Image (spheres, rainbow, N blue to C red):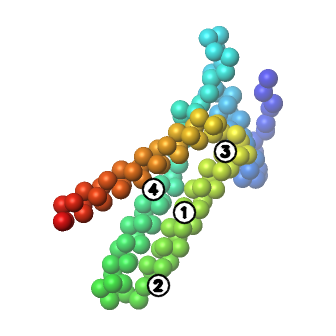
Amino acid sequence: MYVSIQYNMNSTTSQKVIFFWHNFLKNYVDFSNERKHYHYYNEIPYTIWPFYISEMLFISIYFGVLFLNGVESGILSLLSLGLLAIAIFLWFYDLLTESLIFGKYNRKLRRVMVIGFVLFLISEVFVFIGFFWAFF
């Protein structure tokens, strides 16, 4: 049922990624008698990009405050904003790669991700409404 894929240290990055997903499907996708196929849409893999994005956001705010207080020239705040944009781009690139090339995210998971993001935006709107309500 599964094609044997050889892994060596001289493999390219795309071959290593394919090897990882091949092993994931072979070892962690359960075929049982109760269901024909077990989907893994509830197992969203951990990624390092939110950590990098939060670090870059903190550094951007820190250097932005220093720039507004006249302590530094603003080059570091622009550099950290550029790194923040690159980290966000790379995170979305990973999501698109996993979705389009490997077919990891099906329609249900994409819908759940969109609904989760919309609920996050709504919660942020209500937080700022609460701030303005307390201010006025």
Q: Which of marks 3 and 4 is nearer the N terminus?
A: 4
- In the picture, which quadrant includes the C terminus? bottom left
Amino acid found under the numbered disc labelled 2: Ile
Q: Do the residues labelled 3 and 4 touch (CB within 8 Å)?
A: no
Question: How far apart, in angstroms, are the residues tagged by discs 3 and 1?
Answer: 18 Å
Identify the residue position indicated by label 3 in the image: 99
- Up-down relation of residue 59 to residue 117 (above or below): below
Q: Residue at x 37, y 78 (%)?
A: 64
Q: Earlier in the sequence, mark 3 or mark 1?
A: 1
Q: Report the front residue among 129 and 94.
A: 129
Question: How far apart, in angstroms, are the residues tagged by discs 4 and 1?
Answer: 10 Å
Amino acid found under the numbered disc labelled 4: Phe
Which of the two marks, 3 or 1, is nearer to us in this view? 3
Q: Which of marks 2 and 4 is nearer the N terminus?
A: 4
Q: Which residue is drawn at 76% across and 53% down?
A: 12
Question: How far apart, in angstroms, are the residues tagged by discs 3 and 4?
Answer: 21 Å
